[in-house]
Image: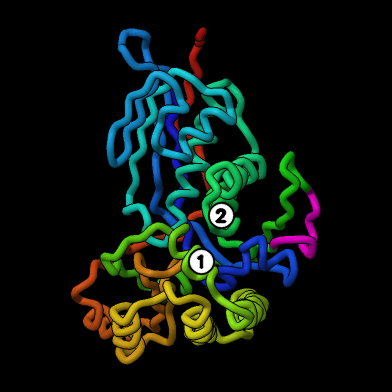
């Protein structure tokens, strides 16, 4: 039996520039962090006493004779990719799926980590990220970028650069090019940033790939907005890493990137989300954004300590989610590979 624990991610700057069709022409970069909310994947070989060969438990239960019969596309394709058979797979999570935190990619990374471990092999983080990108973007043909898979695998507060401009031109078996660079903040500054971020659940959930497809109908205006959002990444990194910088500028830049992101697609926001955001700003938050591709899920605000009570009051109808940054990425909690014969 194998149990993996994989964090969710919170993306601050550059979201959308991790789409391959954009970064191959313009370059791409994001600043994001993983935090202490996780998904857990348990995998073991199914004992041979049932009239089915594979059992999958998530929001529903599937029991099939062959992997290709599974309805869940990521599990079906991952089992075929790694030639896995006769499994019992269970998924659990601290936060709901389809909520803008890269949950599907965290599941993909954690599942692949568990599959390799069940075979008695502990795979490295780059390979897990590469396989998760290949699984979701190519085998499952789901629209989206690369940042979620990389963040879930590596963990930590990072700048992730995509495409030919990435300084790290190491390429795995799929030829993906990206560089993961930790944002070098002092421990005190990182704690201050963590303490100044407030996250709330809007109650709306959606499929990220559906939002991406809707937003892809955009025009040159979308590309222009994404280029402007990309230009904010080095500014935000400077705010975080230079001691002389005013950390409050992080919040102001969040506000700027959200104003830009709203114009990158018709599915990014709704009138209800816009109303919530303005309530937070009017209550004293310096900035914020909806996490993920858009359309719903979690909203984060940057608020100085003296303004936080006011922001919480303005968001009193929503659930606040306390969180702490984490640095480990996907991990194996329990490792007991099994002797197995088909």
Q: How many marks?
A: 2
**Badge 2 local density, few (<14 within 10 Å), some, or many (20+)?**
many
> Residue 7: x, y in percent?
46, 50
Answer above or below: position of 191 versus 9: below
> Residue 131: x, y in percent?
62, 41
Q: CA distance from mark 1 to mark 2?
A: 9 Å
> Residue 100: x, y in percent?
42, 62
Report the residue at 48% width, 20% height from top: 85
On-image quarter of the N terminus: top left
Residue 333 relative to residue 329: left or right: left
Q: Residue furthest left?
A: 317
Residue at numbered disc 1: 11
Q: Which mark is residue 151?
A: 2
Mark 1 touches mark 2? (CB < 8 Å) = yes
> Residue 238: x, y in percent?
65, 79
In the rendered image, residue 166 lying in the magenta stretch gets the answer yes
Report the residue at 49% width, 57% height from top: 34
């Amino acid at each position: 039996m194998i149990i993996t624990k994989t964090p969710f991610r919170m993306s601050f700057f550059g979201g959308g520039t991790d789409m391959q069709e954009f970064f191959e022409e313009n370059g791409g970069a994001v600043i994001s962090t993983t935090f202490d909310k996780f998904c857990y994947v348990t995998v073991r070989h199914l004992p041979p006493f049932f009239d089915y060969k594979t059992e999958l438990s998530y929001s529903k239960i599937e029991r099939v004779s062959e992997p290709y019969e599974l309805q869940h596309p990521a599990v079906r394709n991952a089992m075929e990719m790694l030639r896995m058979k006769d499994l019992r797979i269970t998924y659990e999570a601290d936060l709901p799926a389809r909520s803008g935190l890269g949950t599907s990619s965290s599941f993909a990374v954690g599942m692949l980590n568990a599959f390799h471990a069940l075979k008695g092999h502990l795979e490295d983080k780059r390979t897990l990220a590469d396989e998760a990108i290949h699984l979701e973007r190519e085998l499952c043909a789901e629209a989206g970028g690369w940042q979620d898979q990389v963040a879930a695998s590596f963990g930590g507060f990072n700048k992730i650069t995509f495409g030919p401009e990435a300084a790290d031109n190491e390429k795995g078996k799929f030829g993906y090019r990206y560089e993961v660079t930790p944002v070098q903040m002092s421990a005190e500054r990182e704690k201050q940033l963590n303490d100044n971020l407030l996250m709330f659940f809007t109650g709306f959930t959606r499929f990220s790939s559906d939002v991406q497809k809707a937003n892809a109908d955009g025009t040159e205006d979308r590309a222009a907005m994404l280029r402007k959002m990309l230009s904010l990444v080095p500014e935000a990194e400077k705010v975080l890493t230079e001691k002389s910088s005013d950390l409050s500028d992080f919040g102001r830049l969040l506000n700027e990137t959200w104003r830009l992101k709203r114009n990158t697609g018709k599915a990014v926001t709704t009138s209800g989300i816009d109303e919530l955001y303005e309530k937070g700003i009017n209550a004293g938050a310096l900035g914020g954004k909806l996490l993920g591709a858009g359309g719903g899920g979690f909203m984060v605000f940057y608020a100085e300590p003296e303004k936080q009570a006011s922001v919480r009051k303005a968001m009193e109808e929503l659930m606040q989610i306390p969180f702490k940054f984490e640095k480990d990425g996907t991990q194996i909690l329990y490792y007991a590979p099994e002797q197995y014969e088909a």
